[in-house]
Amino acid sequence: MTNPKPLRIAFMGTPDFSVGILAALVESGHDLVAVYSQPPRKAGRGMDLKKSPVHEFAETKGIEVRTPKSLKGEEEQRAFAALKLDVAIVVAYGLLLPAPILEAPRLGCLNLHASLLPRWRGAAPIQRAIMAGDAETGVMVMQMDEGLDTGPVLGTARIAITGGMTASDLHDELAKIGAPLMVDTLALLAAGKITPTQQSDEGVTYAKKIDKAEARIDWTRPAKELDCHIRGLSPFPGAYFEIIRKGKPERVKVLRAEPVAGSGEPGSALDDALSIACGEGALRLLEVQRAGKGRATAEEFLRGFPLAKGESVT
């Protein structure tokens, strides 16, 4: 879709998920005048300052990058208003946008949200959709207001959550469909050919931030539920169990598993191939990771860390 007139845009984003959308905007012919991203963080063994993926990409394109710690101050708000934007695009930025920021661009601020609103408003929509066993999700372009993901919707793209799909897999697929959706929505917006749709008051759910305490596997739950739980937390923070070795608990993350037939005491090994009994049915663990080690298939794991039939994990 061609743009009738290039828009003057600021992009606001931080992680890998945002980079593909920024790249598509650069290619679309709009005028990217500035990129806002979270400040560089200390990372790695040397604790050197590391720029965000969006920051690094923007620099390769010669776009000015701004990394304020907050947008609540008048000085930052004046600097933002001075850009004289048509629109700001916000994709997983990570900072609260106060009213003066939301109101400064001529067409406001648009957010790409990774769910089918009003389901899964909030911080972790990708993980929560899988953990809840949803059959479908998607991305929406939303006109931002001061509420939590409550603004009217300008565009939608849907995707099925297929069996075996992890949070990492879904993240990548949503980024792929989000980029063309944002470009097409902006073209319609620039042409005055888009009508915002108010979100429904029914079906509202909140995707609260993932708490690491949720990651421990409760083997008394049904295998189908645990499969969703594991996939929703893979690869980070990673659902895990513990097993006693040499009198000490050792943590093992489960990155992929599949429900299988079987029954037994929840948490007990049903065979020598990492099939673990659940409250209903069983899970065969396909890919795991010990603390401080790399990812391993079940076969690789069992070579150095045997778990015999009848042994229990917690």
Image: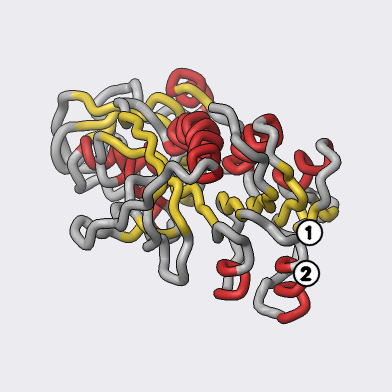
Residue 83 drawn at (x, y percent): 75, 61
Is residue 7 found left or right of 197 in the rendered image? Answer: right
Is residue 57 found left or right of 3 in the rendered image? Answer: right
Nearer to us in this view, 12 or 109: 109
Of marks 2 and 1, the one in the foreground: 2
Mark identifier at residue 66 = 1
Residue 15 drawn at (x, y percent): 63, 46
Residue at (45% x, 47% y) in the render? 141
Nearer to us in this view, 245 or 296: 296
For disc 2, the neighbor class at 10 Å (few under 14, some 14 to 19, many from 20) is few
User: Dots 2 and 1: beta carbons under 8 Å?
Assistant: yes
Mark identifier at residue 79 = 2
Residue lying at the far top in this picture: please name it: 299
Residue at (54% x, 37% y) in the render? 187
Residue 11 drawn at (x, y percent): 66, 50
| Tag 2 secondary structure | helix
Residue 211 drawn at (x, y percent): 43, 60
Q: How many numbered discs?
A: 2
Location of residue 253 with respect to 285 vertically, above or below: below
